[in-house]
Image (cartoon, grey):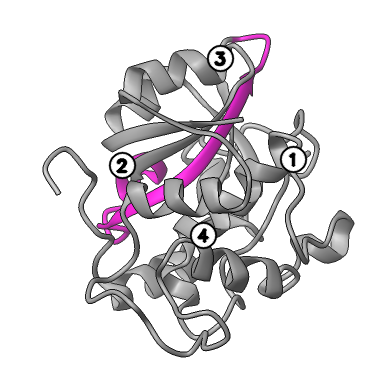
Amino acid sequence: MTGLPGPLDSTLSRRTALRGFGALGLTAAGLLASTQAHASGDLVVVDQIGTGPWDTENCGPTSTVIAMVAAGREVRHYVSGEKGTTVGGNRKAVIEMRARCGLSPWGEPEKKTVDYTGAYLGDLENGLRDAGARATRARFEEGLEAAARGKVVILHVHHGRLLGEEEADYGHFVVAQGEDENGNLRVSDPGRAQEIGITTYSPDRLRHARQGLATVVS
């Protein structure tokens, strides 16, 4: 496991953070870049909450679904539009992706096939390839550069450092693609789908939040 991001941890703190930091707090912190949370390039909003019994751990499989859609790949059971952005709106797509990633058995979403919390980046790459997409491992900085060029990139970040929230003390996966006119990267966060959906962060803020590596999806 050397060189791979560690598993996500602290399910309780994750659930607290997922529900405890609303859009007003983000705006006050200067992190909510736009009220147009659902309109940004090819990125889409998918909420990890409501995606089965392991939803608080599902930022990885959910990010994989987001990345595949953004890259123009077909995702089985994917629900587009406003319905797909709701809590549980893409439950079936994420549950299937969780199985493709090797995190739960096929047809038994209530069970786990791993003995750790969350996922490794390698698990997500397995799921991407099993679903027919390409997954290319990259250093975090290379991932930021690729996202700035319009590539779809899964980033492994520390959620608390990204949000500026001490209680969100765990690793997390988000998807970046494209940049705005100020050079800030557009990011879809499955753990803040209802509060912020898609927003922008400066490259420096993302570097500050770096937890592990990145995967370019195509």
Residue 162 on the magenta span: yes
Name the residue type under label 4: Pro
Q: Earlier in the sequence, mark 1 or mark 2?
A: 1
Farthest residue toward the left?
Answer: 2
Q: Earlier in the sequence, mark 4 or mark 1?
A: 1
> Mark 4–mark 2 contact, CB under 8 Å?
no
Name the residue type under label 2: Arg
Q: Which numbered mark, 1 or 2, is in the foreground of this view?
A: 2
Q: Earlier in the sequence, mark 4 or mark 2?
A: 4
Vertically, is 213 above or below 173? above
Quickly name the residue at label 3. 148
Numbered tag placed on residue 61 in the rendering: 4
Q: Which numbered mark, 4 or 2, is in the foreground of this view?
A: 4
> Mark 1–mark 3 contact, CB under 8 Å?
no
Q: Residue 203: x, y in percent?
A: 43, 19
Instruction: Please report the bounds of the magenta region as a residue range.
Output: 160-182
Classify residue 133 by image quadrant. Answer: top right
**In screen coordinates, is 13 left or right of 103?**
left
Q: Earlier in the sequence, mark 1 or mark 3?
A: 1
> Mark 4–mark 1 contact, CB under 8 Å?
no
Q: Is residue 79 visible?
A: yes
Please tell me how crowded label 4 is: few (under 14), some (14-19), or many (20+) other residues with Cα within 10 Å: many
- 69 or 133, nearer to the observer: 133
Q: Earlier in the sequence, mark 4 or mark 3?
A: 4
Numbered tag placed on residue 161 in the rendering: 2
Dot 3 falls on a residue whose secondary structure is: helix
Q: Residue 147: x, y in percent?
A: 54, 21
